[in-house]
Image: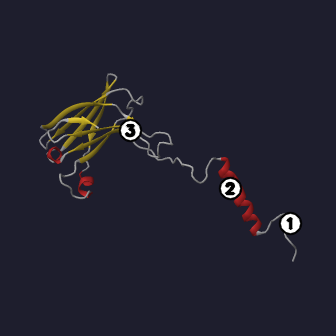
Amino acid sequence: MKQALHGCTPRGALARASAALTALLLLTGCGAGEHICTLRDSPTGISVDVPPKWADRAAEAELVACWDGRCHGGGLRLQKELREAAPSSEPPAPWPGFAVVEGLPEDGRTKVRVELVLRDEGGATVLDERTTLVPKPTYPNGRDCSPGGWQGAVTVTKSGKLTSR
């Protein structure tokens, strides 16, 4: 049996491929201990927590966000199924919701006026409150990676006031 030339045995090919892959990883900055940034993103918008006292009465929710003389927003879905899936707690957990608001300011300084309106089955207003917030960047891949969507967060208090968090 003749000896293969230039390391063309299966074992030699595997060794060459392994060496090439190692070199490629080193050249691209990937290696043990490095933080990998994925393509994971987060939406731009405003999260809302509404305590059951108010959410149980709401058939419809609307969130409007205004800045620089323009308003954006519309429907907001309070996610009852997420609340029901959470372990029971005392006091009962708030109903979470999220309103996608495209184009929120990304400077970390601009104040956004937020209005939250809850209506009952007959269309009567149950809650109509306002507050201001400054959107902040989110980091779904960690702070070593580029930010995802900019977000704000508001909470309805037990007494029915809207506060930013």
Question: Residue 61, position in %: x, y?
Answer: 22, 40
- What residue is rendered at 70% in x and 60% in y? 18
Residue 44's mark? 3
Give residue 5's mark.
1
The numbered mark at residue 22 is 2
Dot 1: element: loop
Give the residue displayed 34% in from the left and 36% down from the top: 101
Q: Quadrant of the C terminus?
A: top left
Amino acid type at circle 3 is Thr
**Residue 10 in the image: above or below residue 19:** below
Q: 107 or 31: nearer the eye?
A: 31
Measured Cα–Cα span from mark 3 to mark 2: 38 Å
In three-dimensional space, the C-alpha distance between marks 2 and 1, rounded to whole angstroms, equals 24 Å
Q: Disc 1 residue type?
A: Leu
**The furthest residue to the bottom:** 1
Which quarter shows the N terminus?
bottom right
Can you say whether 22 is above or below 111 in the image? Answer: below
In this image, 151 relative to 17: left or right? left
Q: Position of residue 163 (x, y in %)?
A: 24, 35
- Taking 156 as reference, is 3 left or right? right
Earlier residue among tags 3 and 1:
1
